[in-house]
Image (tube, rainbow, N blue to C red):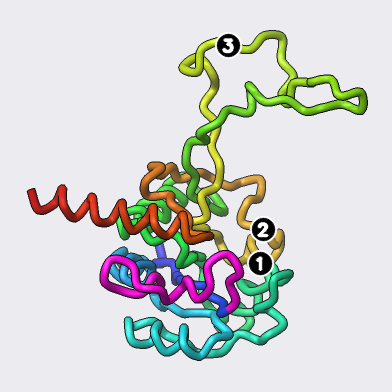
């Protein structure tokens, strides 16, 4: 079989209200975005690694760490209301000729090269159209309720009976934002990474840390410090 041609896309806009300039803040001795660049480089799955950004400083940092920046993202795609899929589609218009796209966000710095490689292999082995990374949910929706118009509690998930022990509940997963992979033809057709033939790649809670605010950044920082100490023992 012909080896598929893979494009890795790192998205990093300049505006961030939760944690200003977070994509280039120093984390564990290097800019936040560098963790993602190095991970995909080490995974070895991508034929080209590119950045989509509207910010000159982020672009400069990404280039320093070996990421290609063949275009600058239009400001209309860098607003708070611009969707990720629109950014991906813009990239594919600029860079045709690939079979798969791997979308990676810099806000998941503890995602490893092995995760990216294994997620891609999981997709290929399952003959799936797309794959997204997930982590087990901390709270189960089977124990959650809605409130009706009379302030009465109604089960979110209706079923004859609900287990009383957590270990008896079905496992549920949430997307962790670390890895999105899709066959490009399918993505152009459906405009989503989570189509009918989407497979999950499971990651640990630690590897799934997603940085949105200063508290998340501190958590990632402390995790890196702890891991480094354990590695040096």
Identify the residue at horizontal 52%, vertical 58% (top origin).
180
Disc 3 target residue: 163
**Contact (Cβ within 8 Å) of mark 1 with mark 3:** no
- Magenta residue check for 142: no
Q: Residues within 10 Å of mark 1 (few under 14, many from 20)?
A: some
Residue 196 is at least partly visible in this image: yes
N-term mark: 1 or 3: 1
In this view, the mark in front (1 or 3): 3
The x and y percentages for residue 232 are 9, 53
Q: Secondary structure at mark 2?
A: loop
Identify the residue at horizontal 49%, vertical 65% (top origin).
105
Disc 1 target residue: 85
**Start-end of magenta stretch:** 15-34
Disc 2 target residue: 192
N-term mark: 1 or 2: 1
Of 126 and 34, nearer the camera is: 34
């Amino acid at each position: 079989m012909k080896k598929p041609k893979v494009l890795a896309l790192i998205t990093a806009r300049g505006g961030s209200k939760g944690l200003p300039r977070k994509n280039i803040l120093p984390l564990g001795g290097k800019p936040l975005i560098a963790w993602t660049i190095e991970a995909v480089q080490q995974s070895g799955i991508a034929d080209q690694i590119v950045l989509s950004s509207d910010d000159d400083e982020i672009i400069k940092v990404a280039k320093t760490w070996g990421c290609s920046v063949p275009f600058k993202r239009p400001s209309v795609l860098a607003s708070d209301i611009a969707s990720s899929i629109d950014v991906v589609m813009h990239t594919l218009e600029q860079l045709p000729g690939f079979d798969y796209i791997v979308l990676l966000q810099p806000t998941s710095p503890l995602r490893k090269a092995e995760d990216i490689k294994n997620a891609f292999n999981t997709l290929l082995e399952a003959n799936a159209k797309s794959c997204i990374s997930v982590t087990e949910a901390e709270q189960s929706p089977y124990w959650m309720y809605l409130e009706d118009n009379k302030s009465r509690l109604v089960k979110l998930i209706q079923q004859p009976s609900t287990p009383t022990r957590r270990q008896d509940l079905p496992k549920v997963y949430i997307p962790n934002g670390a890895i999105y992979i899709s066959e490009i033809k399918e993505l152009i057709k459906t405009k989503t990474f989570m189509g009918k033939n989407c497979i999950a790649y499971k990651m640990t809670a630690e590897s799934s840390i997603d940085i949105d605010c200063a508290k998340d950044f501190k958590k990632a920082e402390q995790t890196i410090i702890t891991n480094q100490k354990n590695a040096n023992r």
